[in-house]
Image (cartoon, rainbow, N blue to C red):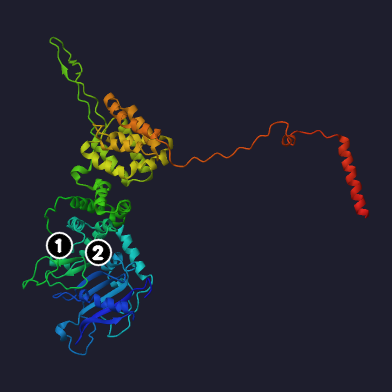
Amino acid sequence: MNATSVDQVEFRWQPGKDFGPVAYSTEDPRIRHAAHLILPMATLPQGVASGHRSLVYLVLPGDGLATIIERSSDPDAVALSAGSPRAGGGRHPQVARALIGPYATVGIDLALACLWQGLDALRLGDPPGQVTYGRTLARLPAGEHEKLLRAFRARAGNRPQPVRGLSALVAAVLRQPERPLAAMLPAADLQAPVQGGYLRGLRFTAAVLLRGTGCAWRPSFSTYEPAQGDDRGGLQPHLVFRAAHAHAGAPPTQPREENRIALWEEAEAPADECARVARCLVRAYNELGGTGLAERLGPVVSQYRTLEARLEATALALRQYAEPSVSAYVFPVQRPAPPAVHRVPGATEPVSAPPADDGTEETDGMDGKLLAELYRMLPTQYDDGFFQLVEWICAAAGRRVRVPEAESGQIVEYLNHVDWYADRLTGHYRELAASRLAGLLQPLLGTRLDSGQPMRWLAGRLSREDDAGVWARAGALIYARLSDPREAAVLADRLVPELLNRLAEPRHETAARPSAPQPVQAPPGLLSDAWRRPVRVPRWLLGGLVLAVVVLSAALAWW
């Protein structure tokens, strides 16, 4: 088996041998060993009706292999024995065809594509259920799965059909990613292809955030398992879909340890961070499609390594898809009220009342909550969109708008993590970078400058020598903009000593090199100085030298 080949294995019932592999596409011992590992999941669940079809996707440990198993109950399947079709309890219609190959080739996207189109979309050669015992199956043609993958990914770019309870499923996975999960659906829904909607939604939401976090999440699934039953043992999918109502009979003696979630119920999910992020993810998925949401989550996954940090960053990146009651803010434009009038006794025309001097200032055109939204949009924007947000934030800073302290903590924590975009601002604005950095800082300083977190960050930044210049100039600009003398004094008391201490410290970047020795100048009158003086040569001496050279050359030529 090479790095891209995909092999096939057919499972059928045989008299005297029970259900097991009957045909392979290779003699590779790894493929034959994998076939025995997946046998419990290739076996059809008890009680399935004629025409049943379900799909299982498993990642095999150790060899870097994965498998896609299509299970079906086909009454037209070729019997492998000459006996009656009812022999063996009528199990001859049970058919399972497995594709086994490297995990990089047989991935979750190919499994979802096969769930969407069926294995018939691939050129398998002999169709499932029409293979005799010992027949050599064909390997999956190279590039055939790529054609199906392209079709699946193109479909994933479209807006999906919303499915009920998807946010609850996403929240359950994010809450305990290492715990096996059973998604409960009514038995009638399990016969329809609704599982694909849940699995595709999970693939482009929770699975993206869990990638590379070290959580024990495995992208494996089974689209149908009975409502109750004993633990099959061996390899089992992480996520299974089960019938919601248990059949009558004795309960299982060794049930599988798993979390269960009913997808058809309208029960309120726990109001925790996972539930809130899950609802944002599902709304964004329904609006942007799978590939569109994956692109939005790409920067979050690349910048953060832990699931907790990714959940927090996702809540910021998808803020516009949060709860409708708090997702949108509008400019609180206040139209001036008509002036109050009063009538003077004996007068015929109303006289406008004099304006009241109540000491209130003119209301700004932007409130602090809307400004906080601009900050939260920064991680999601690139190129021109990012700098448009910066300009609006700086404009709000010029109008002395401040972010409420209740909302500034999370924003400051994120901006500290990215160093307040100082390098990005310097590369774009160059000499104006300090003014833009001051614009980002000022609305978050808060009312108590002596204890604010941005102030501590700014003071600590001034004590460092790398890129401290832009931070010092930003602090000076904020000092010049503050209208309250007390706030300006607090700012100066915190920042100026740090600046003076840094400038007073000796620099240790590179040791001073000893100066190169200068050449010794000879005093005038010495012989060495005579060579530098111009010398006047008589013309008769030059003529004599030329004549001597001519005579000498003629003599040598004659000789």
**Residue at 21% across / 21% down in the picture?**
359
Circle 2 residue: 218
Dot 2 or dot 1, earlier in sequence: 2
**Three-letter amino acid code at disc 1?**
Asn
Residue 308 point in image, percent of width and height: 24, 52
Residue at the extreme top of the image, as rendered: 346
Rendering quarter of residue 335: top left
Q: Position of residue 78 (x, y in %)?
A: 24, 84
| Residue 523, above or below 302 | above
Q: Is residue 280 visible?
A: yes
Identify the amino acid type marked 2: Arg
Task: For marks 2 and 1, give the CA distance.
Answer: 15 Å
Compared to residue 403, the image places residue 198 above or below, namely below
Find residue 455 and report its horizontal and vertical position in percent: 29, 35
Q: Is residue 12 left or right of residue 126?
A: left
Quadrant (top left/top right/bottom left/bottom right) for the N terminus: bottom left
Q: Nearer the viewer, residue 399 or 366?
A: 399
Seen from the viewer's position, the closer of residues 389 and 62 is 62
State the SS at label 2. loop
Per the image, the residue denoted by label 1 is: 259
Q: Quadrant of residue 166?
A: bottom left
Q: How would you rate the neighbour count of disc 2 (Cα within 10 Å): few for under 14, some for 14-19, many for 20 or more? A: some
Q: Residue at x 32, y 51 (%)?
A: 303
